[in-house]
Amino acid sequence: MRGLHIGRIFGIPIQLNWTFLLILPIFAWIIGSDIVRLTELVNDYLGSSIVADSLTIGLTPWLLGLAAAGGLFIGVLLHELGHSVMAMRYDLEIQSITLWLLGGVASFKEIPEDWHKEFNIAIAGPLVSVLVGVLSFVAFLVLPSSLDAARFVLGYLALMNIALAVFNMLPGFPMDGGRVLRALLARNRPHARATQIASEVGKTFAFGLGLLGLFAFSPLMILLAFFIYMAASGEAQQSVLKSAFQGITVGDIMTPERDLLTVDSETTISDLLTRMLTERHTGYPVVNSRDELIGMVTLDHARSIKEVERDAYTVGDVMERDITAISPQADAFTALQAMQEHGTGRLPVVDEGENLVGIVSKTDLMTAFNVIQSRGDTTTLFQQEQSSTDFPSVR
């Protein structure tokens, strides 16, 4: 999830998604417009006697709404930092923390399969939220009773951070509670199977949350249910793929260099389109005279040139030079992750000397996955060299 970079904490990039910039003022408005009822809520749960009338004068409710909403998202950031700092103790790489419409997301480069590590990482976030809630409550208690505005904000944050911890511990995988459930399930069963069970529980939870949202006329609850359902399905699929590709390298499934069709940078766009039509390919590696990979060119690149100018422009003018390549020794699942991260359907495969030795595509990966699933035996599946007809490249 991409966003506006605002800084780093413990070396972790902190980002604001555009939806956060939209939801923050909306949350501030909701809190400010409901200040009387929320004050009664704080008084009922915390045994205080904040006078709501003093909080409704002039701009006060809107300023309090902004302070409470900002404090709530700071609590969410601290929650995600709890996950991240615990993960860093296990030498896991944290790509970013992003605040967005539904809270926060800590993006890990890799989720550990060790149940103990995942349990500790998952539980760390809710524990931080509880700590923030307790500290807010302590500050609420020590402030003079005359400071109603400050006590309202602290009381609200105390309640909301405890509520955040409780909600996140519900078994809505991939929420924290769902990850705790998977970790416990993985103690005595394969990680992929534990993920499938946790995913089914998460999807059931999401379905129930969606129904509750319909009855409560809550679009935000329905959106959250949809997000949980899709995330649970996606993570289960990723787990199945990772398990299936265990022990399989890019070199096992790539289309080798001898079967590849390449172009040079001097080929005109007109000639490139003719080749695409006759050879039924929509993408080519671009190599120089030493067979070194220097770029990739696709049909989209060719289409960017007006028809009347296609004889004047060459592949070198439009090709993608900043390309992501992969080693033939890399895991097949790593190749799939790289494609997803960079939004591409194919990756060139290069050796240590940057020479092109093949290409691997999503079609190659999915065809291999289907064969693995049908064979049920990955140990002998790739012992013999595969030809390009076994796993065709993307056309």
Image: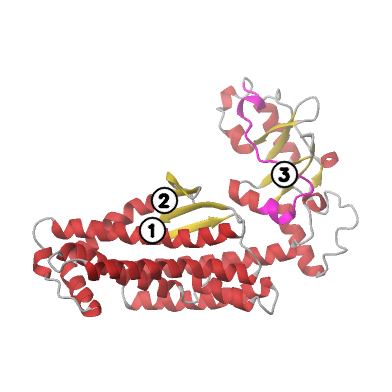
Most prominent secondary structure in the magenta stretch?
loop
* Nearer to me, 238 or 115: 115
Q: How is the image coloured?
A: secondary structure
Identity of the residue drawn at 43% across and 44% down: 7
Magenta residue span: 313-336
- Residue that badge 3 annotates: 326
Measure the C-alpha gap from mark 3 to mark 2: 30 Å
- Label at residue 165: none
Can residue 343 be seen here? Answer: no
Identity of the residue drawn at 15% across and 71% down: 50
Can residue 159 be seen here? Answer: yes
Mark 2 vs 1, N-terminal side: 2
Measure the C-alpha gap from mark 2 to mark 1: 8 Å
Identity of the residue drawn at 69% across and 63% down: 241
* Nearer to me, 318 or 178: 178
Measure the C-alpha gap from mark 3 to mark 1: 34 Å
User: Residue 253 magenta-drawn?
Assistant: no
- What is the crowding at mark 3: few (fewer than 14 residues within 10 Å), some, or many (at least 20)? many
Residue 307 location in percent, x, y?
A: 58, 27
Viewport quadrant of the C terminus: top right
- Residue that badge 2 annotates: 17
* Nearer to me, 164 or 216: 164
Give, as a three-letter code, the residue at label 1.
Leu
Give, as a three-letter code, the residue at label 3.
Ile
User: Is 299 positioned to the left or the right of 253 in the image?
Assistant: left
Q: Which residue appears farthest toward the right when viewing the image?
A: 384
Q: In the rendered structure, are the residues bearing label 2 and label 1 in contact, judged by CB atoms less than 8 Å apart?
A: yes
- Residue that badge 1 annotates: 101
User: Is 149 positioned to the left or the right of 349 in the image?
Assistant: left
